[in-house]
Image: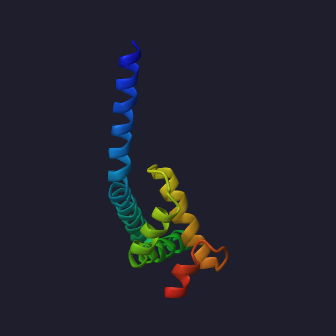
Amino acid sequence: MRTTCTLLLVAGFVFSASIIQAEPGEKESFYRRCIDQKIKNCEIKARLVNSKGKHLRCCAQSAIDQASFYRDSKAELIQAMVQQNLPKKRYKVNHFLITTYSQTVNGDGDQTAGLRAEK
């Protein structure tokens, strides 16, 4: 019994170590896919730019601006998420992206200081 527990513990540590070593590239790939999906979603909303309604046109223009920001800042956004060790959860990445864009547009917060300085 004791030997079995020890073997399971060692196997768990080895498995954990292999996951930790493979995780950074995997996380970057996940973040990149999330940003690409966010850009696609913005591009879909951007199709409303010629709508009759003023509010829809405004939303479409905002989506165009967001897509441009995410496209232009993709590498910096991924690096920032890696540095913050953001979990691989889509809702966390979306919150980060929305917050970063909002802070960049409004000029507040220090989360995007590096992104704003490079623009």
| 62 is higher (above) or lower (below) than 98 | below
Residue 65: x and y in percent read: 47, 77
Residue 116: x and y in percent read: 55, 83
Q: Please, which residue is most extreme toward the front here?
A: 3
| 26 is higher (above) or lower (below) than 53 | above
| 98 is higher (above) or lower (below) than 57 | above
Q: Please, which residue is most extreme toward the top here?
A: 1
Residue 95: x and y in percent read: 54, 58
Residue visible at 61% across and 73% down in the picture:
103
Residue visible at 39% across and 67% down in the picture:
39
Q: Give 18 or 23, whichever is nearer the viewer.
A: 18
Q: Give 33 or 86, whichever is nearer the viewer.
A: 86
Residue visible at 49% across and 65% down in the picture:
83
Residue 8: x and y in percent read: 36, 25
Q: Give 55 or 61, whichever is nearer the viewer.
A: 61
Q: How is the image coloured?
A: rainbow
The answer to whether any part of residue 119 appears in the image is no
The answer to whether any part of residue 41 appears in the image is yes
Q: Please, which residue is most extreme toward the right here?
A: 108
Q: Quadrant of the N terminus?
A: top left
